[in-house]
Amino acid sequence: MSNSIYKVAIVGATGFTGSELARILCQHPHIEIKYITSESHEGKKFSDLHPQFLGILDKTLASSQVIKDDDMDVIFLALPHGISMDFVKTLASHKAKIIDLSGDFRLKSPEVYEAWYQKQHVFPEGFKNAVYGLPELYVDNIKESRLIANPGCYPTASILSLAPLMANGLIESDSVIIDAKSGLTGAGIKASDTTHFSNVNENFKAYGIGTHRHTVEIEEQLTALGQSDAMVQFTPHLLPVDRGILVTAYTKPKGQMDQEKLEKIYRDFYADKPFVRVREKAPGIKDVRGSHYCDVFPYWDRRTQRIISIAAIDNLLKGAASQAVHNMNLMLGLEEKTGLTQIPLRP
């Protein structure tokens, strides 16, 4: 086991993801948080923005300029899409490993990015080296990478709900329907009309119908797993809760299926994946809240001859911050579970 201490920076301290990254990393045995940056709050203490850190992490927030010429091991970019790419371009010659939590390098090409994000990409060269950071699928590539595109929260749950079926060529790839629900923190820390309390409280609605940009991210990864192009019908919904994602995916099998066979497929696929738990009954978001676990439950519906695949994650952790730390562990050659064994919070 390594006794090394690695120096990291978190670029973007104001959001939920930056806060959760700091919470995990400040308790990680091999990590020193050297910098946390914020352009709008430079000079303030991190605990001024996030009072839960008072007396625990009172580090003064710096401008992101300080990291460009400093000796760092890992840089986390907890920034919105469209902004991260500028930093990756600027840091192209930096020796540090970069983990980008935005969507700027998740897709297969700048052309696909521009079509779905409606924004010109300023660093298309980055796509050549970026590795999609889903450890359950790409562990070897992640270990060798210098630039990780941390997956989206919806895609993480959606892909893990279906990966065993796609990888084994067991479903009709054009039959995938994904019904997904997320807590409010998935919309980010900045308030809007959509996230106003009176619009969310005691309410429930679909959004991004047929157009949500995570659709193509899910399609690309399922296609990479399978033998044919995946066509996904993806509909996200906003839950009136703080955090958590629940995905229910519906697919048609290619051949004969039963519950026993289905469960074996999932248990075999995730046998060596410590953070995916195959459940015997449908999980809820409180079963994984505050943790790095993804709980999945496959169900064979004999009446409709469909497979129903359910997955639950914490959108801020397995869907963002803890996934980034998992990637970091692999990139640094650390034991992959280091700093990530928090037990889910329930109730």
Image (tube, rainbow, N blue to C red):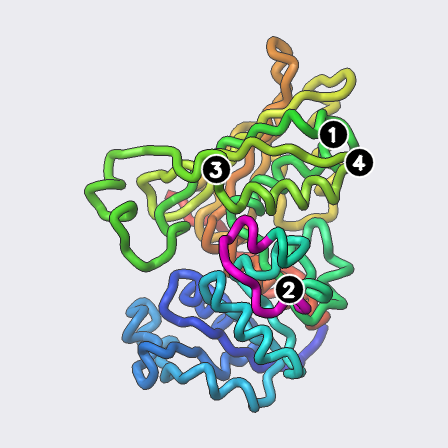
Q: Amino acid at mark 4?
A: Gln
Q: On the picture, is 266 further left or further right than 205? A: right
**What residue is at 43 percent from the left and 39 percent from the top?**
208
Q: Are marks 3 and 4 in contact (CB under 8 Å)?
A: no
The kind of residue tagged 3 is Leu
The residue that mark 1 highlights is 264
> Closer to the N terminus: mark 3 or mark 1?
3
Query: What is the x, y in percent for residue 191?
Result: 28, 55
**Quarter of the figure that contains the N terminus:** bottom right
**Of 94 and 168, the residue lying toward us:** 94
**Marks 1 and 4, how far apart at CA:** 21 Å
Closest to the observer: 125 or 81? Answer: 125
Residue 20, image quadrant: bottom left
Residue located beneath label 2 in the image: 148
**In the depicted view, which residue is nearer to us: 225 or 294?**
225
Residue in view at x 61 percent, y 72 percent: 98
**x and y, in percent, of residue 29 in the image:** 57, 74
| Depicted 168 relative to depicted 21: above or below | above
Q: Residues within 10 Å of mark 2 (few under 14, many from 20)?
A: many
Q: Which mark is residue 227?
A: 4
Q: Is residue 166 visible?
A: yes
> Do we see residue 284 in this rendering?
no
Q: CA distance from mark 2 to mark 4?
A: 25 Å
Mark 3 and mark 4: Cα distance apart in space: 27 Å
Give the extent of the magenta segment.
113-126
Q: Nearer the viewer, mark 3 or mark 4?
A: 4
